Amino acid sequence: MISVTMTVNGKPVSGAVEGRTLLVDFLRETAGLTGTHVGCDTSQCGACTIHVNGRAVKSCTMLAAEADGAEIATIEGMANPDGSLGVIQAAFKEHHGLQCGFCTPGMVMSAASLLAENRNPSEAEIREYLEGNICRCTGYHNIVKAIQAAAAQLG
Amino acid sequence: MPADGGIGASTRRREDVRFLTGKGQYTDDINIRGQAYVHFLRSDIAHGKINNIDTSDAENMPGVIRIFTSKDFEGVGGVPCGWQVTDRFGQPMQEPKHPVLAEGKVRHVGEPIAAVVAETREQARDAAEAIIVDIEELPAVIDMKAALQDGATKVHDDLTGNLCFDWGFVEENREAVDEAIRNAAHVTTLELTNNRLVANPMEPRVAIGDYDAARDEHTLYTTSQNPHVIRLLMGAFVLGIPENKLRVIAPDVGGGFGTKIFHYQEEAFCTFAAKAVNRPVKWTSSRSEAFMSDAHGRDHVTKIELALDENGKFLAVRTDTYANMGAYLSTFAPSVPTWLHGTLMAGNYTTPLVYVNVKAVFTNTVPVDAYRGAGRPEATFQLERVIDKAARELGIDPIELRRRNFIQPDQYPYATPVALEYDTGNYPATMDKLVEIADIKGFAARKAESESRGKKRGLGIAHYIEACGIAPSNLVGQLGARAGLYESATVRVNPTGGLVVMTGSHSHGQGHETTFPQVVAEMIGIDAGMVEIVHGDTANTPMGMGTYGSRSIAVGGSAIVRATEKIIAKARKIAAHLLEASDEDIELKDGQFTVKGTDKSVAWGDVCLAAYVPHNYPLEDLEPGLEETAFYDPANFVYPAGAYACEVEVDPETGKVEIMSFCAADDFGNIINPMIVEGQVHGGLAQGIGQALLEHCVYDENGQLVSGSYMDYAMPRADDLPSFVTDTSCQTPCTHNPLGVKGCGEAGAIGAPPAVVNAVVDALADMGVTHIDMPLTPARVWSAIQAAK
Ligand code: FES
Ligand code: FES
């Protein structure tokens, strides 16, 4: 077993992991943060997307041991400090950008990193950026609208 | 209307807050103290005789608690099928046993052979790898027509062959249809396949069995669209556990699309094993397992003939379909190619004669069952494709040919030759709306512009109808359903006026927690925020049939209306007592009970309090309390319909298809929450376009699953799809349910595939292409262009 410590949503989290333990399993099981989901076993769906040191990463593609010392952000850390929805989360709600909600944490995390890179993405840029996030429910139409609205609001 | 949104308001969804903050509770998020993990050893061979399973090494691996094989399930039932189809000759379908773990033979890749329960997931998996299975491989039965040939290897040795049933509908019309086709001025024939699909909800299936030995109580947590149905099927038919000792909980469910209706072996296994090892037992499907164990969808091979007179009037439709059942009969499987398919072959049209033949075939593949639309996409696809082909052959505009044959608005109720009675509709109106929103007039100019860039542009039209709001119990009972398909609701009013609605419907993305309160709030005239929805737990909801077949608002919503009506009736009596008036004189408006023609009134909350604090209460006439239950059985199906237009650009050099626009004009009757309905249409369209262009579940001739992951199975991604144009302003309210509503969940998946294929064929028609089978991948389109040259 390897002992790891990382900062998750601003708080330190430590645990003992096997060499093969995936970061997503560490977050779900050791850190108890079940908002990050597992939708596949081939790194294709994006349901597990989180931020590692400020960059969007599929947490099923990284070992927990590799994240030792990293700054992690997950969906549980995306609300405002007073608990109200952040701009992107609120836009998803306002524009019905989610149905079953299973892809949603990954979508929000990807959207956040897109908007950090590109403040004013076109529809085509949004669709291309979301290539790695599969949603089976929404047909993406309202997800795209939500991200455009969030972009406008973030200015 | 209630201040926070009643019927017709696009109320934002209350469930979103938990999903957007990571606080949803899906089954895999549940961990029970002391739980063990199961790993299923699944067959990697499509067909074989099991000679021996040696678990001795595996049993000694670290962490192993117990290993199960079919021997442990002696005396336990198979997973049952919920429908029985009677064949053309009056005989029941052939129905093989579907064991929890493979018995004697394996019949598809992915069939569970053994199950290891261990302390950790990794230990269970490691031990499963140490099990030695001796299987004698048999020839795999994959192609449906070959499966029916004399001397074909049998999937089930104890059946007469691989034919599950040979179904004719309407059998009495068979000769008349043959005759009409022989004598018609024109007959258009089309052979096509409806490609096999995998539903792929983003949340893989999960089951957790928990057993309380002290109370002898079982609990199953499962990713299900219908927990009561699972409790009934598993309790009564597989494990023999009475309902009072069995609780099934389906918490937040991450999409279903049909594939989470069915009762699966893993659910029965976890429930059984939890008692056997006296520990909670958890199974989480990987995506790879999902591909080889979730019931698949579609997979029909069809020949359809459409007979027309010299004016383009439809005279008769004859269709022959081979429907793949896979290796075993899943819960709804026999109903899909029969009653959900044959009954739709009249479409929106006045075709007087229809004959549908379906041969259902066992093969060494995963069981096939309902997937979004279930039977109705298969019907609509062949009909709307053959109509398009006929239009081209006769030189009639495809919109005009459809219009000539539409059932007219003054013809309702309209009895089709295939057992349905459409209560209402207006197909010319949805077609008119489509012509407007899709700017059909501007197509020629757009086509010219595309051609100037070397691209072929095509316009595809489809008009669908579907029968949903499943289902009138009496009718489906005659058609072979072994259960009624009503829905239930209990409305409990709390002493200060808030309500809890316990429904048998189940939301796995449809937004019931938002939509149902809109209905109740509107009826009473209170804020929707005063109404809570409880669902998904057999311990605290009345027996209900769940969510599928676009039934939640039409059937479940109607049950809620009926229960709320009973609440209002009783509350009026209480109000009459409080106001010292007769209850006929009491009016309810905006949450106030008023004596007609006076200003004497009492508020909703005061009436509710009086029901629970019955001082000065007419106990001889009225019971205290305010809680009512209703069961609603629909009188008929509901019949949403709509006109779809797809425009594509095809690159003739590469065969690549790009969707330039997709427009949908739907008639869903009255609409409770337009935002949610539009979202349902978007999702259905995406799945329909996925079927048409991308998705294909493929087996090789040895029964190996070629498309077993997202590397090989092409899911629609954001950049594969356009933004959609939707319209729901054509509304002919359903005549037989209290809300006048129809279903909307499956529409897009039904109407989209023929619109897309019609568009691509239109783009390539001048090159001689008349048909391409789905999915229209660049390779297939390019080959079709080459073949037509
Ligand atoms: S679970 Fe990480 S990409 Fe699918
Ligand atoms: S909302 Fe269900 S998968 Fe995206």
Image (cartoon, coloured by chain):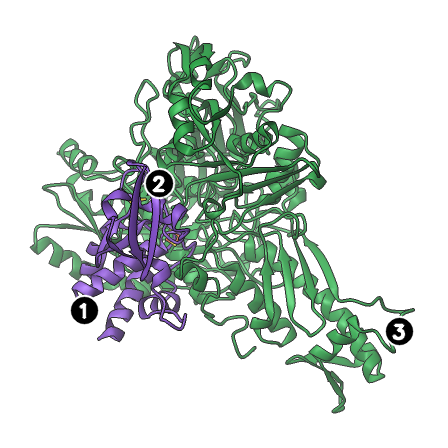
First along the sequence among labels 2 and 3: 2
- In the image, taking residue B597 as reference, residue B581 lies left or right, namely right
Q: Nearer the viewer, residue B148 or B605?
A: B605
Q: Do discs 2 and 1 share a chain? A: no
Q: Residue at x 57, y 21 (%)?
A: B97
Figure chain in purple: A
Q: Label 3 belongs to which residue?
A: B618
Q: In which quadrant will I find the C terminus of chain B?
A: top left
- In the image, taking residue B146 as reference, residue B30 lies left or right, namely right
Which tint is chain B?
green
Q: Label 1 belongs to which residue?
A: A119
Image coordinates for residue A122, horizontal then vertical, percent: 18, 65
Q: Residue furthest right?
A: B620
Q: Nearer the viewer, residue B275 or B749?
A: B275
Amino acid at the residue labelled 3: Pro
**Does the rendering let one see residue B18?**
yes
Image coordinates for residue A119, horizontal then vertical, percent: 18, 69
Q: Label 2 belongs to which residue?
A: B386
Q: Give the mark toward the camera: 1 or 3.
A: 1
Which secondary structure, mark 1?
loop
Amino acid at the residue labelled 2: Val
Q: In which quadrant will I find the N terminus of chain B?
A: bottom right
Chain letter belonging to callout 1 = A
Which secondary structure, mark 3?
loop
